Amino acid sequence: MNRRKFWLSLRPYMMILPAMLAILCFVIYPVFYLLKLSFYKYNLLNHAKSKFVGGDNYKQLFAKDEFYIALTNTVVYTVVTVLLTMLFATLLALWVNQKKGKKFNALLQAGIFTPHIISIVSIALVWMLLMDPNHGILNFLLKSVGLPPSKWLQSSSTSMMSVILVSIWHSVGYYALIVLAALRSVPTPIYEAAELDNAGKFTTFYRITLPMISPQLFFILIIMTIGSFKVFDTVRIMTGGGPNNSTSTLVYHIYEYRSNNLGYASATGIVLMLIIAVLTFVYFRMLSKKVHYQ
Amino acid sequence: MMQSKWSLIQSGINYLLKGIVLLIFIFPFLWMIMTALKTFPETMVYPPKLLPSMPQWSNFVTAMQSGPFFTYTKNSIIITFSIIILQMLIMIPAAYAFAKYRFKGQNILFALVLLAFMIPGQVTFIPVYLMLADWGMINTLLPQILPFVANAFGIFLLRQYFMQVPTEIIESARMDNASEFMIMYKIMVPMSLPALATVGLFSFVSHWNDYFWPLVMTDSTSVRPLTIGIAMLRETEGISNWNIIMAGNVVLVMPILLAYLFSSKQIVKAFVYSGIK
């Protein structure tokens, strides 16, 4: 009987064992391994020749212009992408939520969401075609309304803006959907009460809608910031970090150094992970204080 | 009279603006398909024309013959479906244990699952690659499958669902001598189909589309998926051979676009749900 009890108490552990093993093996252990690598000059061809160099990789990192350029680019990319996407997502959601023209609104909703489920490879390639400075349709449109053409991805002054544009186009529909779901969950009696009090449209939005959807907006803020800090795919395909490092980002920096200076790439990875951890922590502290929750 | 005329104009403008926004999101795909059907000179013509004079179906053949596309497609299918199946097998018992059992260390272990959710693959890929290389797996499809078999988001979502299943149902099934396996697959799973569909769709879309992980995990064409193959078309076909590149692109996009056309409601619901919970 005791043996049976022992096996029964073991049962939940057996059930979670495969999942826990995979998580330990492919997520938790690699973090420690990464930390170790960041203190080594690693030799990919001959592991035995790898040697411990202490904080050298970090010293190298913080003395390198390229790292600061990548960091600045990543921050710029993140701030602009997150703010504009949240703004457009909220506006689109309010717009799609209108009572008039339900059928067309549903179509619009499906349309703006489509890019989100398409591979970033396809998205990037299509936009490179649209943004081609000589034959691209975007410059054709600019010229036909009398505006000067842009070099888009091929000039260091417009390349980051172009990448950001594609990112916003790719994900705004998804976030609009989340905001929309939030809008629809606000109880109508509150709006009716506001109407009785003769509150204007703007006041109603600012005093009722915005506070009520703030948890979802906050959620979007967190996942988008973290996601944007990891930007890589668009950069790799569309610009290769160029021209002149103008679109090089942290993950792209790690990617570039992964084979010829693995220890250095690992140190950069640790820094990126710390940034993300701090952001997450700060956000959750704010979350517990500021945001309205029902 | 004036009032109704004004509101008519207003709603007309409203529709027009919405139409323009819709076009902004649909046009790039339309342009992709049209370019895939053009001849090379037609892609270069100025001012650009939307329709090809004669659809060039041979572009698809050219694109598919420019590399081992049969292998790429096969790899994409094997990787995506292996991940989904393994995730289900691993996720269901784990979520069940976290939802319906009380055991020592439960909270810490669950926190570990959530932590795993937050650690980005964009930094762990270096050690994971070294580890898998040590295990001699780099020239197989396993590096693109194994790291994803435990889906932290899936475990989290499914646990929420399982917790809502009344414990009395489980107790009475146990009275009837049902094994835990039977309870999982005859009670828990059927009651959580929406959550499972969400996770499945999510995995399908994200792994079919994945570019970063296969890029850093593979060294040879024999194990590469379709995304890498299409992205490489620019190198094999020349940077400005847009008709061929777009033809390849259409092949990559079609499965997802078709799935979306036939089940856009479910897909949208799945994504919204995952965003709110």
Image (spheres, coloured by chain):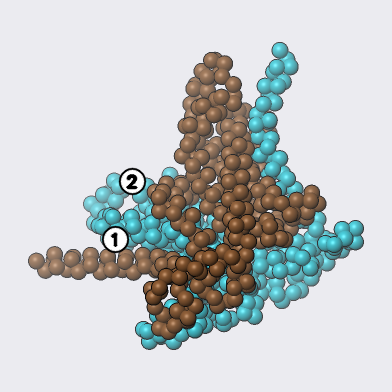
Chain colours: A cyan, B brown
Q: Where on the picture, by quarter, is residue A94? A: bottom left
Tell which circle, 1 or 2, labels the residue nearer the N-terminal end: 2
Kindly state the secondary structure of the residue where label 2 is placed.
loop
What residue is at 65 percent from the left and 48 percent from the top? B145
At label 1, the amino acid type is Lys
What residue is at 68 percent from the left and 30 percent from the top? A14
- In the rendered image, residue B13, in percent from the top left (x then y), is placed at 25, 69
In the drawing, does residue B137 fall left or right of residue A248?
right
At label 2, the amino acid type is Pro
Whole-Å distance between the Cαs marked 1 and 2? 17 Å
Mark 2, Cα crowd under 10 Å, few <14 / some 14-19 / many 20+, is: few
- Residue in the foreground of this view, choosing between A69 and A170: A170
- In the rendered image, residue B272, in percent from the top left (x then y), is placed at 45, 50
What residue is at 54 percent from the left and 15 percent from the top? B175
Q: Could you say which disc has been placed on residue B236 in the image?
A: none
> Label 1 is found on which chain of the structure?
A
Q: Could you say which disc has been placed on residue A187 in the image?
A: 2
From where the camera sits, is residue B95 visible? no
Number of marks drawn: 2
Is there a contact, CB below 8 Å, between mark 1 and mark 2? no
Mark 1, Cα crowd under 10 Å, few <14 / some 14-19 / many 20+, is: few
**Relative to B160, is B201 above or below?**
below
- Residue in the foreground of this view, choosing between A131 and A40: A131
What residue is at 35 percent from the left and 49 percent from the top? A184
> Label 2 is found on which chain of the structure?
A
Disc 1: which residue? A201
From where the camera sits, is residue B17 visible? yes
- In the rendered image, residue A29, in percent from the top left (x then y), is placed at 75, 48
Kindly state the secondary structure of the residue where label 1 is placed.
helix
Circles 1 and 2 on the same subunit: yes
In the drawing, does residue B160 fall left or right of residue A182?
right
